[in-house]
Image: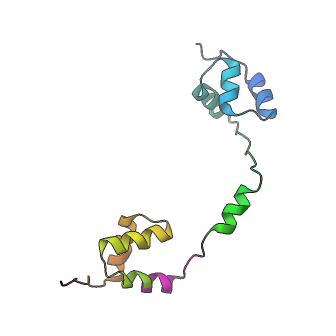
Amino acid sequence: MTRDSFSTEVMCLMIAQGLKQAEVAERLGVTRGAVVARMKREGLEWPARRRSGTAQAFKAAKPRRPSAEDDAASLAATGGRYTALCDWARARGLSHTQALQRWHRLRLPALVRRP
């Protein structure tokens, strides 16, 4: 297909109707990537879709973020062990590597588990 195989005005009308990118692309006979590329090239933004109450429910269910002192204390309590660090990181939405970096910033000695 050529670069201008569909009209930007027609695409904007479909967007105003509330169609999804895939639906617009299907109706115009192009790929979804072509629609996205045209939007970027023309400097247009896709309108945000509203979901009925799910965003508010998600925000309400978000856990409380511990303070820096709580973080340091709970991080020290892991003893630097892999599984404990993984659990600590997962609870805070971090990767294991980020947890390990924070552990090293505290300059705590690793606890050796003796059988």
46 over 53 or under it: above or below? above
Which residue: 31% across, 78% down?
80
- The quadrant where residue 4 appears: top right
Relative depth, front residue between 115 and 83: 115
Q: Position of residue 35 (x, y in %)?
A: 64, 27
97 over 49 or under it: above or below? below
Position of the C terminus by quadrant: bottom left
Q: Is residue 85 left or right of residue 71?
A: left
Q: Position of residue 55 (x, y in %)?
A: 70, 57
Q: Is residue 70 left or right of residue 107?
A: right
Q: Is residue 84 left or right of residue 31?
A: left
112 over 2 or under it: above or below? below
Q: Which residues are magenta?
A: 63-73
Q: Is residue 59 magenta?
A: no
Position of the N terminus by quadrant: top right
- The quadrant where residue 31 appears: top right
Q: Is residue 11 left or right of residue 62?
A: right
Q: Position of residue 112 (x, y in %)?
A: 22, 83
Which residue: 47% across, 81% down?
71
Numbered label tally:
0
Structure colour scheme: rainbow
78 over 29 or under it: above or below? below
Relative depth, front residue between 89 and 11: 89
Q: Position of residue 40 (x, y in %)?
A: 63, 34
Give the residue at the far top of this rendering. Answer: 1
Relative depth, front residue between 115 and 94: 115
Give the residue at the far left of this rendering. Answer: 115
Q: Is residue 68 magenta?
A: yes
